[in-house]
Image: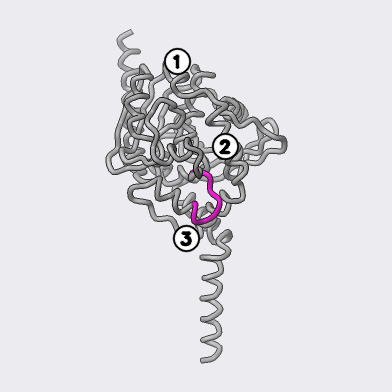
């Protein structure tokens, strides 16, 4: 009986250690299981001195997905399982985030990030592709579309950042007034508060996984502040980019976005001549995490409609 109690105490202690205090091993295991379930596999691709970490899976036309600020490629794992029967999904960690590594100091303006992604795709021999972006990733995607429009089949923008004329959310108003930037994570409490800002109905995330993400973000607090300043002050706004994007685009917004005001959808839709807009009810800042199936189905339907339109026009010619 004593040995049984001792063993049980050891198991409980180890569980508490890994679940709460040292989440990295268990968190990494759970992330690996999530990726496997989604059919997304990690890869490393080196391009111009950058060792890119990315997730890839599926088959079909390439669909490149760019994550937002203080996020990484795992933001697309859950939606990946709904996409990878239709597309070859490629989701890189942008430099400064996730597991992508670089050796020299980098320019973190959105144009510099956009050119790096294009160089990565060159190395991967991907010439033409669909391109999606969430939040900051949407701004990078629009910048790529201005640099190399001939390479884009269509854009998929999920609550994209970068509109300077849109109403400010309370979160961004606080930043504008010189207050605390809730998008920069300093500790686990900050991470939990940020998640509250991002969702209406937060998806379930195992404790070790969110603690792993929170600890990683907290270690990069200073770098995150540099990247945020580069996005805010050193990058072209969407108002300057969007009118020149002559590419089909599906622009999606969560009606209850507390990070970027949902009025942005109508503004951006008016700026982009070939865009279709979709407002998702009861949805926050990260539709691909909060409603992965609905978000994927909206994009698949849009991409199929573009293909049918192309076939129809080709036949008519």
Which callout, 1 or 3, points at the residue further toward the start of the chain? 3
Outermost residue, right side: 104
Compared to 203, does 57 lie above or below?
A: above
* Label 3: element kind: helix
Residue 50 in the image: state x and y as whole percent: 67, 35
What label does residue 94 carry, if any?
2
Residue holding disc 1: 244
* Label 1: element kind: helix
Residue 8 in view, yes or no = yes
Compared to 312, does 34 lie above or below?
A: below
Which callout, 1 or 2, points at the residue further toward the start of the chain? 2
Q: Is residue 70 left or right of residue 289?
A: right
Q: CA distance from mark 3 to mark 2?
A: 24 Å
Residue 226 in the image: state x and y as whole percent: 60, 37
Residue 115 in the image: state x and y as whole percent: 59, 25
Asked if the residue under mark 3 is in contact with the one under mark 1, i.e. CB atoms within 8 Å, the reply is no
Residue 113 in the image: state x and y as whole percent: 58, 30
Residue holding disc 3: 207
Neighbor class of circle 3 (other Cα within 10 Å; few <14, some 14-19, many 20+) is: some
What label does residue 162 carry, if any?
none
Q: Is residue 102 left or right of residue 61?
A: right
Q: 55 or 230: nearer the eye?
A: 230
Neighbor class of circle 1 (other Cα within 10 Å; few <14, some 14-19, many 20+) is: some
Q: 150 or 219: nearer the eye?
A: 219
Q: Residue at x 46, y 33 (%)?
A: 133
Q: Is residue 184 magenta?
A: yes
Outermost residue, top side: 317
Query: Magenta region: which residues?
Result: 183-190
């Amino acid at each position: 009986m004593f040995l049984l109690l001792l063993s049980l105490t050891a198991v409980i202690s180890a569980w508490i250690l890994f679940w709460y205090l040292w989440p990295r091993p268990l968190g990494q295991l759970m992330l690996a299981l999530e990726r496997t379930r989604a059919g997304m596999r990690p890869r490393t691709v080196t391009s111009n001195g950058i060792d890119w970490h990315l997730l890839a899976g599926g088959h079909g036309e390439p669909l490149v997905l760019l994550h937002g600020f203080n996020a990484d490629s795992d933001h697309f794992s859950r939606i990946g399982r709904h996409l990878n029967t239709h597309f070859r999904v490629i989701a890189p960690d942008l430099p400064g985030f996730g597991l992508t590594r670089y050796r020299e100091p980098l320019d973190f303006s959105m144009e510099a990030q956009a050119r790096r992604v294009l160089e990565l795709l060159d190395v991967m021999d991907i010439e033409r592709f669909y391109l999606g972006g969430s939040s900051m990733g949407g701004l990078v995607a629009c910048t790529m579309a201005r640099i190399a429009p001939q390479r884009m089949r269509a854009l998929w923008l999920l609550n994209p950042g970068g509109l300077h004329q849109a109403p400010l959310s309370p979160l961004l108003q606080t930043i504008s007034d010189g207050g605390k930037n809730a998008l920069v994570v300093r500790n686990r409490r900050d991470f939990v508060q940020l998640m509250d800002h991002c969702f209406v109905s937060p998806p379930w995330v195992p404790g070790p996984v969110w603690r792993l993400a929170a600890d990683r973000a907290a270690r990069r607090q200073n770098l995150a502040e540099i990247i945020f300043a580069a996005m805010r002050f050193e990058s072209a706004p969407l108002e300057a980019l969007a009118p020149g994007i002559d590419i089909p685009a599906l622009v999606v917004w969560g009606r209850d976005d507390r990070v970027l005001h949902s009025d942005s959808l109508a503004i951006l839709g008016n700026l982009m001549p070939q865009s279709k807009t979709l407002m998702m009810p009861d949805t926050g800042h990260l539709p691909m995490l909060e409603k992965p199936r609905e978000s994927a189905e909206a994009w698949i339907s849009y991409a199929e409609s573009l293909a049918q339109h192309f076939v129809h026009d080709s036949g008519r010619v």
